[in-house]
Image (spheres, rainbow, N blue to C red):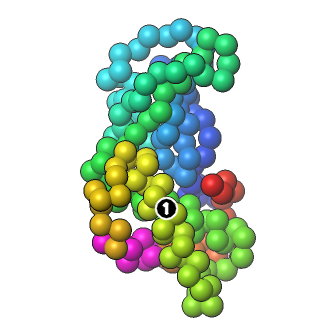
Amino acid sequence: MSTRTVRNGWERLPNGFDVEFRHDIPVRLSDNGRGMTVPEEVLLEEVAALGKLHVSLGDWEAGERDGEREASLYVASGEFSEVLRRLATASAALFVERYHKPVGNADVDWDRLEYLKDFETALECCRLSEGDVDRASSLDEYLETMHSETRRLAQSGDVPPVEPE
């Protein structure tokens, strides 16, 4: 049985809107060009129920298809640590997919470089600025999450497909 570690792509909400996930983080919402009107509170509740993160909605803009509207989704700043944890899990899956082993001492700075990239991504996802979160404060937890996930994935042999940034 497969354990889905990282969700990527579009998923349908009960109201007919679609939400895009990147590394298990909701990032965009689409009305699919159907001209539907659903109260914002309802949209955000449904995204939170599906993604297990509280989000806010950016401005609606023209989508990729005719008549489609899309809006960016931003995770609540108080959930920064969870966003970073999910990114650590995605980076772990990427490492195991590429190298077929857990992160080890011979993998010089790979995990710390991923942390720097994922930290910036988490800031963007939560609409935070560089000074809003201490960069060093979450490093140990990030590394523990990534390393334990690489060990789990390498042992199980069940590595989910990963979409690198």
Task: Indicate the amino acid at tag 1.
Answer: Asp
Q: Residue at x 41, y 29 (%)?
A: 58
Q: Residue at x 68, y 19 (%)?
A: 65
Residue 44: x and y, percent?
Answer: 37, 29
Residue 16: x and y, percent?
Answer: 53, 19
162 left or right of 41 in image = right
Q: Residue at x 67, y 13 (%)?
A: 66
Q: Nearer the viewer, residue 108 or 157?
A: 108
Residue 121 forms part of the magenta stretch: no
Q: Which residues are magenta?
A: 137-145
Where residue 164 sits, quadrant-wise, is bottom right
User: Looking at the image, is 7 positioned above or below residue 104?
Assistant: above
Q: Which residue is mark 1?
A: 118
35 left or right of 144 in image = right
Q: Quadrant of the C terminus?
A: bottom right
147 left or right of 84 in image = right
